[in-house]
Image (cartoon, rainbow, N blue to C red):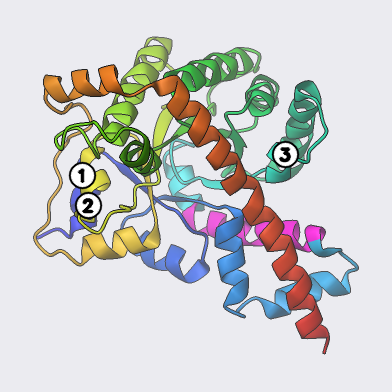
Amino acid sequence: MSTPLESLVATGTKLWLDSIDPEKVALNRKLGATGATSNPIIVSDLIKTGRFDDLIKRFSDQGLDDEAVAWAMTDHLVAEAQKTFKSVNDQTKGNDGWVSFELDPLLEDASCKLSIPEKSARYVELGKKWAAGHTNRMIKVPATPGGLGAVEEMCAAGITLNVTLIFSERQLKIANENVWRGAQRRASRDRFKSVFSIFVSRLDIYTEKHCADLSPAAQGMVGIVNAKHLWQVNNAFWTPKNLPLKQEIIFASTGTKLPSDPVEKYVAAFAGSDIETNPPKTNEDVQAKPGLTFTKQIDKMPPAAVVEEINKKVDMVKLETTLMEEGLSKFADPHKALIALIASKRKELAR
């Protein structure tokens, strides 16, 4: 009898891990995970364990400042995770087995004085730097004006992209078109792969607060309805291109936020296609439900009345604007916290 996560993978879902903790990567690889993604919160949490003090000391002894140590740590941890998934990447000829590396979130901080074209140019420069020499590293860039303005050039340069912080059809369509323009400038599209990260549970937190008039049947379903719709939009764009590799949606923030929700709520909703990046705790909780099996649900929408109510009552423009503002602070603040953590850790290690 298969485990819950084996059942999920059997539906056609690629299971990725929302962590680059070496121990969790090794464990989840055995459970069926075939990729991973990283961010500054994950790196901070790893540093707090004390397991990487020697590495911090080594980077410090090389004369790196706090921010440079943060990037050196991220680079090291992502590269280690890449080793675990390299065989998957080889076997699938680049269709799976990737680890995401997030570019500088401070480019989206309110204090950043760069113009949008300058931000785009900086994303391109950093993307080339951190992708160089890696076969299974994805470069994560946000679907902001600066990020979206960079993806054509990055894709044309042969960089594999994870366009993240997508909440709306508007963002996804721009990302699709810009990435495809870049792909068409490549000498070969044999290794062309891109993914588009759709955030899910954050939408349901938003509607609880801002759309209190939704019926019980619709409340808590907006994230699922939106993400399934975007999956359809993405398929409609890429399927006619007949590319060797699949350009996929990543269903991100799949951990439940409400105690009343079953742990598998979002995991089950998107079973059957593309990629889910689940937090380690979500995978742990799902595995702890013996007998839980998944079936293909990605192509099944909730009842038409629910979809109609959501379309009528949820202002997606306002939702995107609000969640992008929140998302960008959640993007930049953890990176500042990571740099501050490294500063305090270095003082502690220097005693």
Three-letter residue code for mark 3: Ala
Q: Horizontal and vertical percent for residue 79?
A: 62, 56
Residue bearing mark 2: 264
Viewer-nearest of discs 1 and 3: 3
Q: State which quadrant residue 109 falls in.
A: top right
Counting residues from the start of the chain, the first of labels 1 and 3 encountered is 3
Residue bearing mark 1: 268
Q: In the rendered structure, are the residues bearing label 3 and label 2 in contact, judged by CB atoms less than 8 Å apart?
A: no
Three-letter residue code for mark 1: Ala
Q: Characterize the local packing of mark 1: few (<14), some (14-19) or many (20 or more) Cα atoms within 10 angstroms.
A: some
Residue 188 is covered by the magenta coloring: no
Report the magenta residues as a range.
67-85
Viewer-nearest of discs 3 and 2: 3
Q: In the rendered structure, are the residues bearing label 2 and label 1 in contact, judged by CB atoms less than 8 Å apart?
A: yes
Question: Which label number is shown at residue 326?
Answer: none
Q: Extreme right residue here?
A: 63
Counting residues from the start of the chain, the first of labels 3 and 2 encountered is 3
- Compared to 76, does 94 lie above or below? above
